[in-house]
Amino acid sequence: MSVIRAATGADAPAVDALLRSCFLRDAEVRLVQQLAIDGDLVLVLIAEEDGAIAGMIAASRMQVTADTREVAAVALAPLAVARAARGQGVGEALVAAAIAHLRSAGVELAFVLGDPGYYGRFGFEAATARGFDSPYAGDNFMGIRLNDGPCIHAPGTAAHARAFAALGEDA
Ligand SMILES: CC(C)(COP(=O)(O)OP(=O)(O)OC[C@H]1O[C@@H](n2cnc3c(N)ncnc32)[C@H](O)[C@@H]1OP(=O)(O)O)[C@@H](O)C(=O)NCCC(=O)NCCS
């Protein structure tokens, strides 16, 4: 059974190795490192199994506007689960824990870029992200409202932390 906990600095090498093995490139490693350097990381959770890191999820600050106000919003990425630990609910437990944490922290909107077949189960919907100006706009760009705020009538911009720009160049 995995335990979900907040990451510490001591986890960094294992997190880097996990990301490299899951994405088969360095872009996500550099993304998380740069988010941390820029002070844009809001949350990093680890799933630990028998003392080893089985998965991780990160959330980073976004600049989001709607109806001429700023919306407290984050991007949930990356999510990674070690191959040997997949299909056992580790990813689901990480996303659920991240959502609970962000909700209690007062975050209003969380965005993901991913497979609707996976993220739909948590309540992420393309409809929630639709209309926001983002380089990721499309059916795989989804959002979830985490807290009641004023209804959003006119979505504005949904800007990811600047570290994501390098990810696009690498893709
Ligand atoms: C995606 C990932 C995090 C899932 O982790 P996991 O611990 O296996 O996930 P869970 O056990 O919670 O859920 C597994 C379920 O999700 C489904 N699933 C996995 N990836 C999926 C995808 N891309 N689209 C739709 N469903 C997917 C599985 O078929 C399984 O379905 P089931 O519950 O009906 O059996 C893992 O496969 C991974 O690290 N992949 C490589 C990195 C990646 O793509 N990350 C996501 C970036 S947005």
Image (cartoon, rainbow, N blue to C red):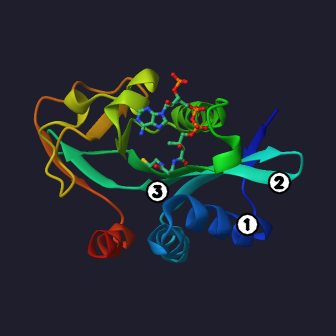
Q: Quadrant of residue 145?
A: top left
Q: Is residue 46 visible?
A: no
At a point 35% along the width and 67% down the height, the residue shown is 164
Q: In this rendering, would 6 be left or right of 43?
A: right
Provide the secondary structure element on which disc 3 rests.
Answer: strand
Q: Quadrant of residue 89?
A: top right
At a point 18% along the width and 54% down the height, the residue shown is 134
Provide the secondary structure element on which disc 1 rests.
Answer: helix
> Mark 2 — residue?
52
- Mark 3 neighbour density, 10 Å: few (under 14) some (14–19) many (20 or more): many
> Mark 3 — residue?
60
153, above or below 39, in the image: above
Check disc 2 and give the amino acid type.
Answer: Ala
Check disc 1 and give the amino acid type.
Answer: Ala
Residue nearest the viewer, comparing 156 with 10: 10
> Mark 1 — residue?
14
15, above or below 133, in the image: below
Estimate the x, y position of residue 118 in percent, counting from the top left.
42, 31
> Cα distance, mark 2 to mark 3?
24 Å
